[in-house]
Image (spheres, rainbow, N blue to C red):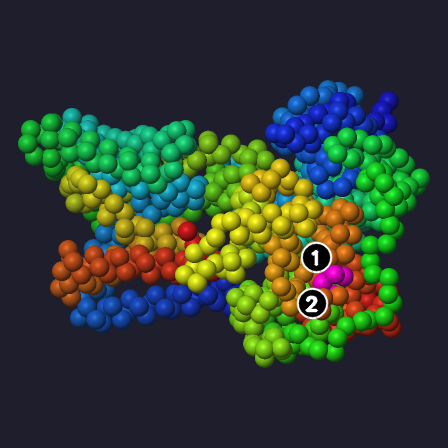
Amino acid sequence: MANIKALRQNPRVRAQFIIAAVLLSLFVAMHFVSGFKLLSPGNVKLLITQSVFPAFVSWGMMFIFTSGIVDLSVGANCILSANVGVLLAQYLGLGYPGLILGTVLAAVALEQLTIFCAVTLKIPSWIAGLGMALVMESATTVGLSAYLSGTNILWLDEYRALGTFPAMLAALILGAAVSMLISDRTAIGCNIRAVGGSPHVSGAMGIDAKRTVILGAVIGAAFFGIGSVFQVSYASKFIPVAGLGSLSTIFNPLAVVLLSGSFARYINTSVGVLVGSVLVTSIFNMLTLLGVPSGTWQQILLGAIVVTCGMISGVHTKGVVK
Amino acid sequence: MTSDIVLSVTGIDKHFGATHANRCITLTIKRGTVHGLAGENGSGKSTLASIISGIQAPDCGVMFKDGRHYTPETPLGANRQGVAMVVQELGVIGGLTAAQNLFLGKMKQFSRFGVVNVRRLLEAAHTAFAKWELPEVPLELPASAFSIEQRKMLELARALTNDPDVLVLDEISQVLSHDNRRVLYRFIDNFKAGGKTILMVTHDLEEMLAICDEISILRDGALVSTHDAADLDADKVKRLMIGREVSGHYYRMDAKADYSPDIVLKAEDFHVPGQIERVSFELHRGEILGVCGLSDAGIHELGTALFGLAEHRTGRLTYIPANTELKSAKDVVKTHGAYLSKDRDAYGLMLDADIHSNISLPNADRLSGALGFQNPRSLRALSEQAMKDYEIKSSGLEQHTRRLSGGNKQKVNLSRWLVKDLEYIILDCPTRGVDVGVKAYIYGILMELKRKGVGIILISDELPEAMGMSDRIMVLKDHRNAAVLNREADFSEERIVEVML
């Protein structure tokens, strides 16, 4: 009894209860606005399924951004690595191992290229990321056009079990657990935050900053790869884009990362990513249910959500956020 | 048989560009002693300490520890050979918890298959504080939530987790308040009693003479001499440091409070939740109002809040001559007010900018034309004048501020405000980390400001300083104004400590 009283008086626990209550009210309100369709059993399955990709990309971004690297090639990386996985599984007959390992290893290798440009060649990471995004987008389009003679869309007709509902739900839960474990309970998770916090101090404590950034990128890219596997299994394709169109792929995850970061004082960031992914997906789902056009108004709202999340994440920051 | 000498350095030389920071220094440090390094700002004390701790590599020279060749290439290498250091600038990572900061880089001992056992980590962190009777900080909170004193204690505890037999403390007591200094002194006694050695850099000569067994004096990067502390007094140390006779008195000599009856600033029911509890006071023209208190009394928070940087502030702060309420830092600057933070490096200076940028920043608006355009020539002239007037030792206006010694950094910090026509100034520990020469210089400036009728709020962790310079002292206890003491009647250390406690 005394423990429960102490918990109630804990400001963090109180804030968690308030956040949970606000979220619940928000979902109920959206359910009401959507004509009682949002939380129908069929739609909940859809929400969970569609939350998997933004959640995994957000977890990956969390590891990379925390180490001090701002990588904007994530979307292009996911598209190219997913297509590598489909190619290996479907067209070269390597099945599930080809799909999973091919996608994850490609994502890790591509991310390492970006990190090489940023860390070893000392190019500011956001510039390196933009450059690599252009390279990856072009490589995907040119490579697929050459391989498929004319069209550039690879279809995954088989090996799609991972894109079904129970597997997607399990992926969300396991993803959150693994992200939390690595981020909060491992030495590498601690080192990533240390290097992002102060390379000088962490260096003086014997932490190899370069190695830590590289390992952080390996972990982050593994999340991108796994997210891409689920996405391509669910949607059966990952259409290549050009002219930095891949950036729009990461707007949802970016909103999720900002949102989870803004509540990090109260909710574990990995759990925040999980909740944020479902929330952002639900907002778009509600808009679709309301018949809001996806190419225009939904994108305007997406921009507004990213800006709002950015504002919320800066609430506790003194001074100018750059 | 264990030798008496734990560490010896021979012929240590170090350059930073054109600056010759250490000149062929040779000294020995005895086991189980506290060895002080004294010298003016820029005399090479911190450089020598950082070479011994593996932070810097010497250009030439050799070191021996326990009779063996000692070559620490990194701080970690020094730790492995039994040497640890608490640096002058703060070195904790805000995003990590206290426990994680404590064992950063040493997590393997708590890990199995890469997964950290948090319970064991917290237990070890608790033990690290308890072993040396240091005040424990909240172990599961991020270090960004800590005060400067808590962060310093965390750094000390972190250094001790290496179980060093030589501990280098670089100006650690400068950020500590009265009560935490006592904790530090008790720790030093315990550490020494265990046969371990401390190399201590401090500008507080009274503290150095009281604590150290031997004192080495550096001047212009070279070792002047090493003495038994018992053979020295403060005047002798000053003379050796500066190379000439210096006055024994820093502080004002008058015993009476002396200020105008005109009020400059008036605070009424000044309140910041959890930091300041309904504090009211008046600051007069030409008055130095000292503010003292224990570490958690809220004295530094009061300075931040008065300058308009605290959130959720209530109550009223008024600039009386214009009957203007001061709600933000902008209002303070507009009414010819200024504020110097205790944490000079974090909140005072732009360390990676040059001296010119630092000096011209608060004056840029004033020197702008009607359309907001700045005249680079007048800004530069102002910076040059400030450098000259306040005797800032540097290689020029373009020198990075980070490269300056502590005293010269503080001169830059002060001068950029003092070149303005001030009505009042809030100073939070203005002599923190500066040597006796600069200290005397700053006190001289305060007296000059007082003569000009500037109202000064002097927040200080050092009672002798507060008593030596103030007309009145406001003592805060538990975030409240516990008493206001007058120079002619109440100024004694016993009386102030009695109110503090």
Estimate the x, y position of residue A277 in percent, counting from the top left: 30, 54
Q: Which chain is mark 2 on?
A: B
- Answer left or right for B365 relative to B219: left
**Which quadrant holds the C terminus of chain B?**
bottom right
User: Disc 2 marks which amino acid?
Assistant: Val
Estimate the x, y position of residue A247 in percent, counting from the top left: 25, 45
Residue B245 image-quadrant placement: top right
Q: Which of B242 and A30 is in front in this view?
A: B242
Vertical placement of residue A119 versus A180, above or below = above
The residue positioned 63% from the left and 78% from the top of the image is B320
Q: Is mark 1 on a helix, strand or loop?
A: loop
- What residue is pinned by disc 1? B429
Vertical placement of residue B393 versus A315, above or below = above
Magenta-colored span = B446-450
- Is residue B447 covered in magenta? yes
Numbered badge on residue B454:
2
Magenta stretch: dominant SS?
Answer: helix
- Answer left or right for A308 relative to B276: left
